[in-house]
Image (cartoon, rainbow, N blue to C red):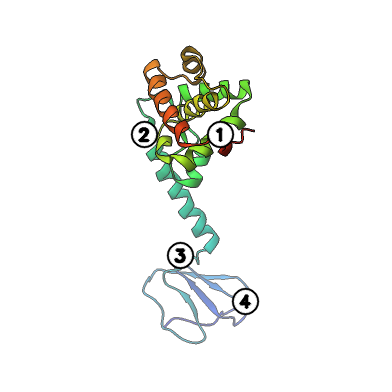
């Protein structure tokens, strides 16, 4: 028969199966070592722990879930860029959004964006990209640098009534002469779909 009271102070005993000890809940004295791991009788004057489980903090659960989500996303991104050293991922953005779109950039796109910043034409190009999105959104199903190149060509057609020089466009946006010709045809088509009055360049 197991004792349920502390022989020292008469306090309630705790059968701690995790530590393998019988401890007094009042004075903290370790009364004995547990050798029999079968649960004690359930009595109102006995506190027992057969398989103690720590209550999980909801905040910790969320953090653990987010951690594993980030690990999966990171592994997915790594598989995508493995063997493609010219691709770069904005990991902070991808881990937050879970979308590879607009988070992966090539060396060519990064260099094109640097050229755009140096020329100070990003705001103007964004204006024409938004215009294209309203008029002919299918035209924007391209790489970032191709979209910027298309906007650049359209801005020339609109403001100067002529296309920009081919070598200038290929140099700024890191596109091929073949891509330039395709984008020029598309820009002329879009320009015919709009009226000058609808364009308010910044």
Residue 22 seen in the figure: yes
Q: Nearer the viewer, mark 3 or mark 4?
A: 3
Q: Position of residue 52 (x, y in %)?
A: 45, 68
Residue annotated with mark 1: 196
Residue 26: numbered disc:
4
Residue 88 seen in the figure: no
The Cα atoms of the two marked residues, 3 and 1, are separated by: 80 Å
The Cα atoms of the two marked residues, 2 and 3, are separated by: 46 Å
Residue annotated with mark 3: 18
Q: Nearer the viewer, mark 2 or mark 3?
A: 2
Q: Which of the two labelled residues, at mark 3 and mark 4, occupies the earlier sequence position? A: 3
> In the rendered view, would you say 35 is above or below 145?
below
Q: Nearer the viewer, mark 4 or mark 2?
A: 2
Q: Is 187 placed left or right of 120 in the picture?
A: left
Residue occupying the point 49% across, 70% down:
32
Element on which disc 2 rests: helix
Q: Position of residue 94 (x, y in %)?
A: 48, 41
The Cα atoms of the two marked residues, 4 and 1, are separated by: 88 Å
- Which image quarter holds the N terminus? bottom left
Q: Which of the two labelled residues, at mark 3 and mark 1, occupies the earlier sequence position? A: 3
> In the rendered view, would you say 15 is above or below 126?
below
The Cα atoms of the two marked residues, 1 and 2, are separated by: 43 Å
Q: Which of the two labelled residues, at mark 4 and mark 1, occupies the earlier sequence position? A: 4
Element on which disc 4 rests: loop
Residue 83: numbered disc:
none
- Which image quarter holds the C terminus? top right
Q: Nearer the viewer, mark 3 or mark 1?
A: 1
The Cα atoms of the two marked residues, 4 and 2, are separated by: 60 Å
Residue annotated with mark 2: 80
């Amino acid at each position: 028969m197991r004792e349920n009271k502390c022989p020292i102070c008469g306090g309630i005993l705790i059968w701690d199966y995790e530590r393998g000890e019988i401890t007094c809940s009042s004075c903290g004295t370790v009364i004995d070592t547990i050798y029999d791991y079968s649960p004690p009788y359930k009595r109102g004057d006995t506190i027992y722990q057969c398989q103690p489980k720590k209550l999980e903090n909801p905040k910790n659960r969320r953090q653990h879930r987010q951690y594993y989500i980030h690990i999966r996303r990171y592994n997915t991104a790594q598989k995508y860029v493995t063997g493609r050293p010219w691709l770069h991922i904005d990991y902070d953005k991808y881990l937050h959004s879970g979308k590879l779109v607009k988070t992966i950039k090539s060396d060519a796109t990064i260099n094109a964006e640097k050229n755009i910043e140096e020329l100070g034409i990003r705001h103007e190009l964004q204006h024409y990209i938004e215009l294209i999105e309203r008029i002919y959104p299918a035209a924007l199903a391209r790489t970032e640098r191709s979209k910027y190149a298309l906007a650049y060509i359209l801005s020339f057609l609109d403001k100067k009534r002529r296309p920009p020089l081919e070598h200038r466009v290929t140099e700024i946006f890191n596109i091929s002469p073949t891509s330039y010709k395709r984008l020029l045809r598309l820009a002329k088509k879009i320009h015919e779909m709009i009226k000058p009055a609808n364009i308010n360049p910044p």
